[in-house]
Image (cartoon, coloured by chain):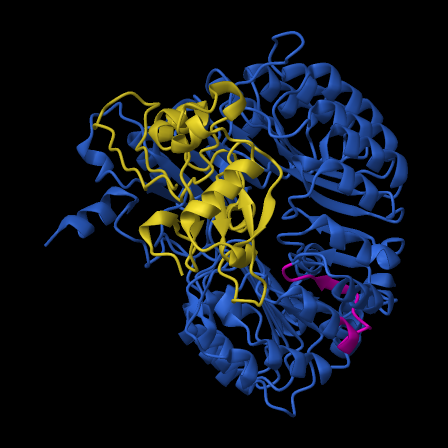
Chain colours: A blue, B yellow
Amino acid sequence: MPKRLAYSLPDEVLEHVFSFIQSDKDRNVVSAVCKSWYEIERWCRRKIFVGNCYAVSPKMVIRRFPQVRSIELKGKPHFADFNLVPDGWGGYVLPWITEMAGAYPWLDEIRLKRMVVTDESLELIAKSFKDFKVLVLASCEGFSTDGLAALAASCKNLRELDLRESEVDDSSVHWLSHFPETYTSMVSLNISCLGSGEVSFSALERLVSRCPNLRSLKLNRAVPLDKTANILRLAPQLVEFGTCTYSAELRSDVFSNLAGAFSNCKELRSLSGFWDVVPDYLPAIYSVCSRLTSLNLSYATIQSPDLIMLVSHCPSLQRLLVLDYIEDSGLEALASNCKDLQELRVFPSDPFDAEPNASLTEQGLVAVSLGCPKLQSVLYFCRRMSNAALVTIAQNRPNLTRFRLCIIEPNTADYLTGEPFDVGFGAIVEHCKDLIRLSLSGLLTDCVFEYIGKYAKKLEMLSVAFAGDSDLGLHHVLSGCESLRKLEIRDCPFGDKALLTNAAKLETMRSLWMSSCSVSFEACKLLSQKMPRLNVEVIDERGPPDSRPENCTVDKLYIYRSVAGPRFDMPPFVWTKDEDLALRLSP
Amino acid sequence: MCMELQLGLALPGSDTWSRPLLKLGLYEDINVNSKKRGFDHGYLEDEFSAASFKNYEKGLVGWPPVETWRRKKLRCQVHNHMTAAENGYCGGRASNSTYVKVKMEGVVIARKIDISIHQSFETLTTTLMTMFDIFDENRRSFKLTYQDKEGDWLIAEDVPWR
């Protein structure tokens, strides 16, 4: 009886049921049930996430999903954030926009990360999508304020424009003024990455004053402090605010104006920015502190006492980004004041100095892990660590889902015992059963990888640097970590054997990055031949890898699964299989 | 003073672990720890020996893993040099304030100085030396640098006072 019922449900009913299913994973499962469900599902899928823009071609996406409204694309590998991917590697969005312009006239959301976006792409977006609403460009580059002007002028219903961490060229166009006077739709605007010349303050003020739904506003550093109060008074409904430059000599009139403006903002929950912050002005935000859930002080070069004062006013804090100026004492204060803390990121104020700039050690992290029961996500830069501390953290915080530790000096051992950190990280993966992201550092042998392979069953992303002794390390990870999607490795003695033995595993992952390891070009070619659905890219600016001796290792290797085959936009320093090489070298 | 872009090429077939010493970005925070070296080490003289902290010597690109954009944003702020940042922030618009932030290398806390009350580099330097407790004999070891609108660090005495 139930079987017949399933087949007799009309398509419209199924479609309606499917509309409640939002997650990609669930949608994929639905589409695999039977042919008719596949057909129905593909026509009603509205949101697409493509984690690697080269894993599939835009034509293939459009063919399967003809009525998409929202797309998210990611381009360059994560290590591009640290300058490890040479310029010109790829990640161009224009081919996608070109195809979608024709196929998806009702596309209203585009979210991009680490992609090369040109003014031409932005102009095409402005022209092609009549109801365009959301543009998020995270860590993108290649465009200027000209492109932004085109968007401002054409997109009447633009709700969200978020340029977080992107690099924007200043074409000296007052692009903000291109929003017509009739435009009132802005809900979220993040221009914190823009330089000084790229924002006209008066245009910004006019824009803010006519957008009553504005909830999130993140300004760039060029807007001076005395103007901040003006902006806040125009938008007291803000939930998220990124301050502009916070620097100036303390003037009591500016201070009281600012404090008054902040006190009007009853909905404010998140603050960021704080460039050039002068501690004297910090009390201006005290009136909102008790409601703050997110605070990004990672550009604020203020010292521990001021930081302690600030966090002691923020009992509701769930997310804190801060520099190591907070010191162990500040983290202890955080641990006692902020019991709702879920995410902590501590960045180094002076990453290139051998000597510590601030008194921040493993003690601070231990204090927070003991004091904050909801702590789930950690990113911590420090200069010393011990296995004992890691074990304490692991035992007390089994609910950790993201743990990224960066001991600044490579190969640093446990400062108490001189041992590697195998046991410490082993404890982390053993106790934190829901760990999905892990970054290792310090002195590490193959042992740590054995622990990871054995325990880290839910791990999806692993970052490794200056660790391990042999191929066995890599083998443990590839053979043991069932949920692994992204693996990025630098400066480790991992080579051909582990890679070739676990070739099949690579097709179950999004990507593998290996740089300054011990993989030979021969192995890369072999892997490429064995696994046609993997793109094996050797990134080497020294010249053709063939021209070096047999045992010479490749500089950088990026392997990713793809159903689109080899890409056509490879620069000269990316080397793939023999045939392509021959074509490249032929006159 | 900024470190220039340095480029070194590894020979083909050389040791697996050596790689092109391509240092991207400007590591202006050379950050000689003055507590260790004493004031008679002029930081200009030590420009290259200052690059003796390990990461720099190894020529490690992308380590520690701090995002490029984050480094840039931090760089535009308080520095560990004896410098004057134009109008107190990197590349900012000119404001009415004549107060300028000055930071000395090795000293964490910056000071502010009203540049309008000085008529020459001489008086400015003298005042700064007093502020940071630098004795006469060590004066020559320090150089006054400033950051222009493009974020470039230049020697102050190279341009006429205005």
Residue depicted at 41% across the width and 58% down the height: B150
Residue A229, by quadrant, is: bottom right
Lateral position of residue A357 relative to residue A187, left or right: left
Lateral position of residue A368 relative to residue B18, left or right: right
Count of marks overlaid on the render: 0
Query: Which quadrant of the rendered structure holds the C terminus of chain B?
Result: bottom left
Res. A533 in view: no
Q: Nearer the viewer, residue B24 or A355?
A: A355
Residues in magenta, as a range:
A232-245
Q: Is residue A104 above or below residue B101?
A: below
**What is the x, y in percent for residue B66?**
54, 40
Residue A499, by quadrant, is: top left
Lateral position of residue A364 relative to residue A130, left or right: right
Q: Nearer the viewer, residue A452 or A393?
A: A393
**What is the x, y in percent for residue B105?**
50, 35
**What is the x, y in percent for residue A147?**
46, 76
Q: Magenta includes A68?
A: no
Q: Nearer the viewer, residue B79 or A533?
A: B79
Res. B75 in view: yes
Q: Magenta includes A234?
A: yes
- Which residue lies most toward the bottom here? A182
**What is the x, y in percent for residue A546?**
21, 35
Query: Which quadrant of the rendered structure holds the N terminus of chain B?
Result: top left
Residue depicted at 70% across the width and 79% down the height: A208
